[in-house]
Amino acid sequence: MLFISIVFSIPIYLFGIWSFYDPEESYFYFEKWRYKEIPELSEIQIKLIRIGSVVAMIFWTIFLIVVAIDTFTPEPPFP
């Protein structure tokens, strides 16, 4: 389970870092085909995208720590 979580964490961290540094491009990544001209995002929307990417990376890190602890904790022997 830990290996699978680490493999899935690579794109999550890459997308989170990309969303933090370039929030407008990441927000319209799958929606560019809808618009002739890409609309402007407000400063509040940009801040919310950045906060959301940081929070997602923090939660994913906590998840990885919990999975690692669960993986390496020995199970008690059966009575």
Image: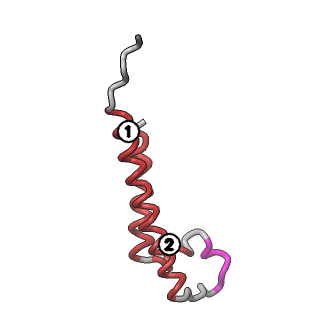
- Please determine whether, in this image, residue 76 is positioned above or below residue 50: above
Residue occupying the point 35% across, 40% down: 68
Residue occupying the point 50% across, 88% down: 43
Distance (Cα) linking label 2 and label 1: 27 Å
Residue occupying the point 45% across, 71% down: 19
Give left or right: position of 31 versus 73. right
Answer with the quarter of the image where residue 58 lies: bottom left
Mark 1, residues whose alpha carbon is within 10 Å: few (<14), some, or many (≥20)? few
Q: Nearer the viewer, residue 73 or 25?
A: 73
Answer with the quarter of the image where residue 54 lies: bottom left
Q: Position of residue 21 (x, y in %)?
A: 39, 76
Q: Position of residue 67 (x, y in %)?
A: 40, 41
Q: Position of residue 27 (x, y in %)?
A: 54, 74
Mark 2, residues whose alpha carbon is within 10 Å: few (<14), some, or many (≥20)? some
- Please determine whether, in this image, residue 17 is positioned above or below residue 61: below
Q: Amino acid at mark 1?
A: Phe
User: In the image as oriented, which residue stretches furthest toward the front?
Assistant: 79
The residue labelled by disc 1 is: 3
The residue labelled by disc 2 is: 26
Residue occupying the point 43% across, 36% down: 1
The boundaries of the magenta stretch are: 31-36
How is the structure coloured here?
A: secondary structure
